[in-house]
Image: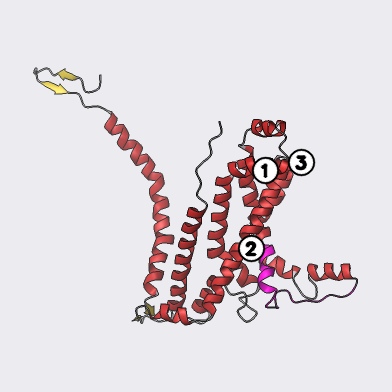
Amino acid sequence: MKGTPVTNPAGAIVAKKPKGGRSRVRRNLFIASFILPTLLLYLIFTVYPMLKGIYLSLFDWSGGSMDYNFIGLDNFKEMFKDPIIPKALLNDYFLVAGKVIGFMVLALFFAVALTRLKIKGSGFYRAIFFLPNVISVVVVGVLWRYVYNPNLGFLNSLIGAIKKEEFVFPWLGDAATAMWSLLPPSIWAGVGFCTLLLIAGILSIPDSLYEAAGLDGATQWQQFWHITLPLTWEQIQTSVIWIVMTTLNGSFIIVSIMTEGGPDNATQVLGSYLYQQGFRQYHLSYAAAIGVLTLVVSLVTTVALQRIMKREPLEIS
């Protein structure tokens, strides 16, 4: 028995030590051997650059010299006087709103169609929808630049064929349409991920709920609104948070490839403006301040969305 006293040859009573402590230490060491490398990489490639960026934002540094001139919060004061910053911030939120609406409408439609409507070959369509997710964002940007090409692009050719006359329009070169033109490639490249996430959520709902609703006379729309939507809310919440975070932190890639922030900064976002300031105009410290702003905006937006979308989990009985 654990902890049972035993008698040694000399007659002294010695308590037998339990073996549970040693096995617990081995288990903890085994778990730590998996956690520590990942934690170390996270600290090196995420936490350290984040702290370094905050540190550099307090200096006047071009990036090409060893001279660091401490200026405190002057970069932030200059940033809030910069007329491009509010425009870039509005463009970021424009992409967030457009992608959230586009992603969720299309993802819900595809997910319901491939599960509840019993479409043949649904596995094939799932693979097709997810295919753009494995394509590099750079490739997506280059591909859609050809789609929008004023002279040889597919879109103008299609419109010209419908109108039966030559149609030439610079979709990415016009300030009124440039931001709107960034939404289709952004949605096309990522909607498959949300679709698969929602499909998994819908497939976890018991068929008996839909059968009971059908016997009670509920239509397909009523079943979607009262069964599918509430019971996939966790997947919807996860999708929305993922869209917001990837847009605020990664939309600069598609912008840099397709428009480079133009025309006349009409499509500038915080990430693309940070890149221009840091690596083209060599204002590294000012770019670091923009990075700090991006970090704050991302955190505040994510926390606010989590609070807004928070709901009590529904239990299926």
Q: What residue does disc 2 label?
A: 98
How much space separates mark 3 and mark 2, taking CA atoms?
A: 28 Å
The answer to whether 88 appears left or right of 31 in the picture is: right
Determine contact: label 3, label 2, CB under 8 Å: no
Q: Is residue 303 visible?
A: yes
Indicate whether residue 37 is drawn in magenta: no
| 138 versus 173 height, above or below | above
How much space separates mark 1 and mark 3, taking CA atoms?
A: 17 Å
Chief secondary structure of the magenta portion: loop
Nearest the eye: 24 or 12? 24
Which mark, by number, is residue 224?
1
Percent position (x, y) of residue 128?
72, 50
Q: Amino acid at mark 2?
A: Gly
**Quarter-wise, where is residue 23 in the image?**
top left
Q: Amino acid at mark 3?
A: Ile
At 72% across and 41% down in the image, what residue appears? Answer: 220
Q: Residues within 10 Å of mark 1 (few under 14, many from 20)?
A: some
Residue segment shown in magenta? 165-185
Q: Dividing the image into 4 quarters, which one contains the C terminus? A: top right
Q: Dividing the image into 4 quarters, which one contains the N terminus? A: top left
Q: Is residue 135 visible?
A: no
Task: From the image, state whether disc 3 or disc 2 is nearer to you.
Answer: 2
Q: Residues within 10 Å of mark 2 (few under 14, many from 20)?
A: some
Q: Amino acid at mark 1?
A: Phe
Q: Secondary structure at mark 3?
A: loop
Indicate whether residue 173 is drawn in magenta: yes
N-terminal label among 1 and 2: 2
Q: What residue does disc 3 label?
A: 119
Nearest the eye: 57 or 100? 100
